[in-house]
Amino acid sequence: MTPTLILVPGLGDSGPEHWQSLWERKYGAARVRQDDPDQPDPECWAARLDEVVRTTPGELVLVAHSLGVPTVAHWAARFDVPERVRGALLVAPPDPERQGALEEVRRFVPWPTGPLPFPALVVASENDPYATFERAQAFADAWGAEFVTAGEAGHINTESGHGEWPEGEVLLSEALHAWTPPDITRF
């Protein structure tokens, strides 16, 4: 059985041409839909993620983008994480302490910095306008996550030219291979 992807969008809920939305349609993924994706609240967003995790059956893999990344970290720090959460692909985490960080991002301070209770892969761009590459690596280190570069890929979103994002699918496939037993069907 293939794990179900749970997509955890960031601010604005990832538009229809964003790779998360395309993956939702392509893989039949579950999606965390926040009540107000433009006014994030870490407690409410983490609680909604927990609700989706609890109501989605089977093995799960979280796929978070931007402000969805600290949502996963807050959730893991505040809730009992089921063992069936096999891992997380955490893409383009923003830095709440960056000069000029959006108020919506600063609301997530303090970010949980303890190790995540599941394997994770942080993917960061070397020219992300919302976090330096070094800060993204520091987040990965704090969470006990693997870390890879997406090269100079902006914020790895539609605005930076990442609709389909096939490189992300390769990373997801490799992560799934590492996180699941050999008898599991992979993407």
Image (cartoon, grey):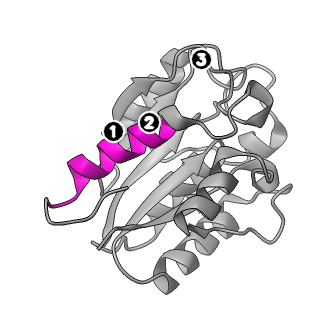
**Residue 141 in view here:** no
Quarter in which the N terminus is drawn: bottom left
Q: Secondary structure at mark 3?
A: loop
Q: What residue is shown with label 2?
A: 122
Q: Which mark is drawn over residue 109?
A: none
Q: What residue is shown with label 3?
A: 132
Q: Earlier in the sequence, mark 2 or mark 1?
A: 2
Name the residue rendered at 24%, 53% in the picture.
179
Find out whether the residues at labels 2 and 1 contact each other: C-beta distance under 8 Å.
yes
Going by the image, does 60 lie left or right of 91?
left
x and y, in percent, of residue 160 in the image: 74, 26
Name the residue rendered at 30%, 39% in the picture.
144
Quarter in which the C terminus is drawn: bottom left
Q: What residue is shown with label 1?
A: 145
On whether residue 171 falls in the magenta region, the answer is yes
* Above/below status of 130 relative to 175: above
- Disc 3 residue type? Thr
Find out whether the residues at labels 3 and 2 contact each other: C-beta distance under 8 Å.
no
For marks 3 and 2, give the CA distance. Answer: 13 Å
Going by the image, does 61 lie left or right of 153?
left
- Disc 2 residue type? Val
x and y, in percent, of residue 93 in the image: 58, 36
Q: Secondary structure at mark 2?
A: strand
* Above/below status of 139 relative to 6: above
Q: How many marks?
A: 3
**Residue 11 in view here:** yes
Going by the image, does 147 lie left or right of 65?
left
Q: Which residues are magenta?
A: 168-181
**Quarter residue 37 falls in:** bottom right
